[in-house]
Image (spheres, grey):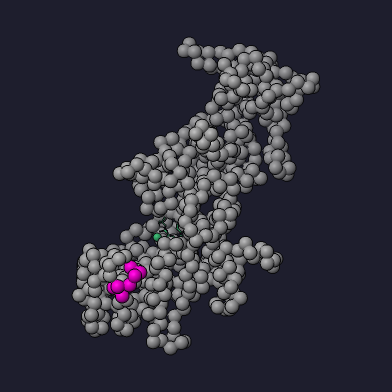
């Protein structure tokens, strides 16, 4: 456990933790902290959900409390078993253990009892108006609503109709159960909100037992209440729903003796996470999957937790990011580079370094004996001595990166060009003597000489070279498919499209580039999920698409933030 925090550290507490500490001090909840993470299983979790997960499970951990994973499965049509499995897997991968895994639908019986209770108290009624009329009669922010002609039905009639609704006597959309609150309330959520609607649809958990389903506002508070949640943490869009959250629980408690009252939690709202170049709406992400614009929910370009995982992100980096952004009361947008920097920081410490040539160009060392191979020592991770060393085979024919050679060097180009000498990482100095071209003038190979005295990378005569490039031995290297990813959207705000245009027109057509790379042979034994730094390129992970004999790598993140550089350049030009 953490040591007692000093007053200074407490100052840094966000408003939610501050509220919890105040409650603990006053004994409001008997010192207990119980939270929940309540996703609707209608898609995969995304990085926005990670913020909520880190908060809910995080405070439970910090204050010795509990956090439930609760599937908010009150809506039968959109929910699928696949999502349920994926969600729990993602929560656990992030490093959290739910105290209980619960389905809201398990509470349908209790919610039904509460609804009958409200009808008996004259606080709910069956309305025969169409959905359209209900909407029309709701009024606006400036005009009060109009009461339904069915609002004053007797308790007996309401009980009978609601029972028939449950039994399946009425078609979809023909009736709803509404709370009887106030059609003139300045808060539109309190203008007789719908509690139940009729839906003759089978549910993944309750099957065909129900043909009426509770609405979110009616259900959510009771789910929290049944689980004796102390702090119901949700996003800002629910701030206007809070009075209703309390009204429903108060309505059930009305007239009950103290010992029969149901648990009444409190709701606290925080800002959603928005990230540049990132779409955080399950509905829209589903569209991308369904329309084949990405390969799957866990396509590494997707902002889903499973997409980030497949791309090579670590749970530690995501948690450190969530801790860094903290909690606030105003919606804002965080730069994706902030998340990427946490990942770089984490991988820098733990990813073994390897040499990989992404776009190979053949180099022949003409003064190196044919058929000879030697093993050169290379350091696995300069940040971690315990990672040790490995050897790299060196021979007469090598591959270097195409962009590390220029036949006619542009100004300030210090890499390989005719007449210039460079260092091969962990190996020798080489000097370019000439290039070989095919009939159409394309360079097919570059000829160089090496200086045997520079073994290990330094010249005994003290002469310097201006650059060090990476390489692999052609005969020993292994080919691999490498998938290079870029942002899925072209603009920082994915919804930023010209008037009338669809958000999908903003998809980046170059979000995936596939190259055939040549890797140093030690990578042969890499397994899906293993992470490496390919020197000078970035961090890469083995994709599960890999098969025996054909490795597939994903670029997790480049070494530097190339987009920031681009936008700086743009800014300077202006
Ligand atoms: P979406 O619009 O993507 O479907 P949602 O809010 O409907 O999101 P839920 O499954 O209902 O998704 O969300 C579960 C929990 O995660 C809720 O408490 C919700 O407030 C929270 N959450 C969802 N998106 C974000 C986000 N971008 N930032 C922080 N919390 C989020
Ligand atoms: Mg939702």
Relative to 117, is 232 on the left or the right?
right
Specify start and end residues of the magenta stretch as a single range.
182-188
Where residue 178 appears, as percent x and y from the top left, is 29, 73
Where residue 177 appears, as percent x and y from the top left, is 28, 73
Report if residue 185 lies within the magenta region. Answer: yes
Where residue 333 appears, as percent x and y from the top left, is 48, 51
Which sits in the foreground, 44 or 225?
225
Residue 73 lies in what quarter of the image?
bottom left
Residue 202 lies in what quarter of the image?
bottom left
User: Does residue 235 appear anywhere in the picture?
Assistant: yes
Report if residue 44 lies within the magenta region. Answer: no
Relative to 4, is 244 on the left or the right?
left
Q: Residue at the location (70% across, 26% down)? A: 427
Q: Residue at the location (48% across, 11% down)? A: 439
Q: Residue at the location (59% across, 24% down)? A: 404
Q: Is residue 155 above or below residue 392?
A: below
Q: Residue furthest top?
A: 439
Task: Report the quarter where the N terminus lies.
Answer: bottom right
Q: Is residue 83 above or below residue 523?
A: below
Q: Residue at the location (36% across, 71% down)? A: 218
Q: Is residue 115 above or below residue 464?
A: below
Where residue 525 appears, as percent x and y from the top left, is 60, 38
Provide the major secondary structure of the magenta segment.
loop
Q: Is residue 134 above or below residue 498?
A: below
């Amino acid at each position: 456990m953490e040591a007692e925090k000093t007053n200074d550290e407490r100052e840094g507490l966000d408003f939610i933790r501050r509220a919890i500490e105040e409650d603990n001090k006053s004994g409001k909840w008997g010192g207990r902290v119980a939270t929940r993470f309540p996703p609707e299983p209608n898609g995969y979790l995304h990085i926005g959900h990670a913020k909520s997960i880190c908060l809910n499970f995080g405070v439970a951990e910090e204050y010795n409390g509990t956090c439930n994973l609760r599937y908010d499965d009150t809506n039968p049509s959109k929910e699928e078993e696949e999502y349920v499995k994926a969600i729990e897997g993602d929560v656990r991968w992030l490093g959290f253990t739910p105290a209980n895994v619960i389905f809201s639908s398990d509470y349908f019986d209790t919610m039904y009892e509460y609804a009958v209770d409200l009808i008996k108290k004259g606080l709910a009624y069956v309305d025969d108006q169409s959905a359209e009329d209900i909407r029309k009669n709701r009024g606006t922010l400036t005009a009060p609503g109009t009461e339904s002609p069915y609002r004053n039905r007797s308790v007996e009639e309401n009980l009978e109709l609601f029972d028939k609704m449950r039994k399946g006597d009425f078609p979809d959309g023909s009736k709803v159960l509404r709370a009887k609150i106030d059609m003139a309330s300045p808060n539109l959520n309190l203008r007789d909100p719908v509690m139940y609607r009729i839906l003759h649809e089978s549910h993944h958990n309750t099957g065909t037992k129900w043909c009426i389903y509770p609405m979110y506002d009616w259900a959510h508070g009771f789910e929290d209440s049944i689980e004796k949640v102390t702090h119901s943490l949700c996003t800002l869009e629910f701030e206007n729903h809070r009075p209703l959250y309390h009204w429903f629980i108060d309505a059930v408690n009305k007239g009950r003796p103290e010992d029969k009252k149901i648990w009444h939690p409190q709701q606290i709202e925080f800002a959603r996470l928005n990230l540049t170049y990132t779409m955080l709406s399950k509905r829209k992400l589903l569209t991308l999957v369904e329309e084949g614009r990405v390969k799957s929910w866990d396509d590494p370009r997707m902002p889903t937790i499973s997409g980030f995982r497949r791309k090579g992100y670590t749970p530690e980096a995501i948690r450190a990011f969530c801790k860094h952004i903290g909690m606030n009361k105003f919606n804002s947008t965080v730069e994706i580079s902030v998340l990427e920097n946490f990942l770089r920081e984490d991988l820098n410490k733990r990813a073994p370094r390897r040499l990989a040539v992404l776009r190979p160009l053949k180099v022949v060392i003409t003064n190196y004996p044919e058929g000879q191979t030697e093993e050169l020592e290379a350091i696995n991770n300069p940040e971690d001595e315990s990672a040790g060393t490995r050897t790299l085979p060196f021979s007469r024919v090598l591959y270097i990166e195409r962009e590390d050679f220029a036949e006619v060097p542009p100004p300030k180009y210090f890499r390989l060009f005719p007449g210039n000498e460079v260092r091969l990482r962990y190996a020798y100095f080489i000097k370019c003597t000439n290039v070989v071209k095919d009939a159409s003038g394309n360079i097919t190979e570059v000829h160089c000489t090496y200086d045997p005295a520079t073994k290990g990378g330094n010249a005994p005569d003290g002469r310097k070279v201006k650059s060090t490039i990476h390489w692999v031995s052609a005969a020993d290297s292994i080919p691999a498919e490498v998938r290079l990813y870029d942002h899925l959207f072209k603009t920082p705000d994915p919804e930023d499209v010209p008037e009338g245009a669809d958000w999908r027109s903003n998809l980046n057509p170059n979000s995936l580039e596939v190259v055939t790379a040549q890797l140093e042979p030690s990578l042969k034994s890499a397994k899906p999920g293993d992470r490496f730094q390919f020197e000078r390129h970035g961090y890469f992970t083995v994709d599960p698409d890999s098969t025996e004999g054909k490795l597939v790598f994903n670029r997790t993140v480049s070494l530097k933030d190339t987009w920031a550089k681009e936008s700086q350049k743009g800014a300077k030009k202006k």
